[in-house]
Image: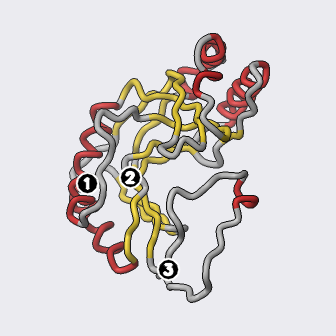
Amino acid sequence: MFPDSDVPHHDDITKHGGRVRSFGHERGNWASYVYTAFHPCEEFWDMLEELESVARKHGITLTKMEEFHISLSQTVILRHHWINPFVQSLRDRLSSVRRFLCVADQLKVYVNKEKTRTFLGLEVVTGHQQLLEVVSEVDKSLQEFDLETFYQNPSFHVSLAWCLGEVTKNLQGSCLLELQKVVDEFEDSDVLTRFYANEIRCKCGNKVMTIPLH
């Protein structure tokens, strides 16, 4: 299911917008993370277009995310033979978790650990406690494999768009107030920013395993 390749991997940053890997590719190692997906409706993209337009007025060019989710783990490295046991551990620990509502309607600015990218995200205001409970179980599975657990006091959020570099200050202040006004005043924004966490996913390389919630 996860064949090892003997062909050496060369990371070409021109193929992914100048983004830099936080760790090198190594045969038999799989960059993996746990998350719950957010599937936006068509009107959500219209709201994103308006957010991009406001950011451009402040001299910031944002690139929309290709998919949307709430991270429930850091990106960790799983060895090939760990993947199935790790996912089974997640299934066992999350078997009694019920689906829950999330509302993410507060804009916030984030920067990655390497300070190579800045993100505009919607912070979760409803569902935070349930997400903490899921993370607690995910952390236990990570600890079984001596892997790094999630951040302390996490700000759960859906990343909307990003730009290269550490430009937090440029997106704060009046810019962030204008961006938040777009969200607050957008038609049906209360519908666009709420969704149910129906499943937990684990992505290993390009393989995604799904754990449904009841």
Check disc 3 and give the amino acid type: Arg
Determine if residue 184 is in view.
no
Seen from the viewer's position, the closer of residues 60 and 41 is 60
Task: Answer left or right for 119 relative to 131.
Answer: right
Q: Is residue 170 above or below residue 162?
A: above
Spatial distance from mark 3 to mark 1, Cα to Cα? 30 Å
Which numbered circle lies on residue 94? 1
The residue shown at (25%, 52%) is: 139
Q: Earlier in the sequence, mark 1 or mark 2?
A: 1
The residue shown at (65%, 32%) is: 44
x, y percent for residue 150:
32, 46
Q: Secondary structure at mark 1?
A: loop
Spatial distance from mark 3 to mark 2, Cα to Cα? 27 Å
Asked where in the image residue 81 lies, by quadrant, the reply is bottom left
Which residue is disc 2 drawn over? 200
Q: Is residue 105 above or below residue 210?
A: above
Determine if residue 29 is in view.
yes
Which numbered circle lies on residue 36? none
Seen from the viewer's position, the closer of residues 37 and 30 is 30
Which residue is disc 3 drawn over? 27
Q: Residues within 10 Å of mark 2 (few under 14, many from 20)?
A: many
Q: Check whether the beta carbons of the residues at disc 1 and disc 2 lie within 8 A of each other.
A: yes
x, y percent for residue 32:
43, 62
x, y percent for residue 37:
49, 47
Check disc 1 and give the amino acid type: Leu
Q: Is residue 128 above or below residue 87?
A: above
The residue shown at (25%, 66%) is: 145
Q: Earlier in the sequence, mark 3 or mark 2?
A: 3
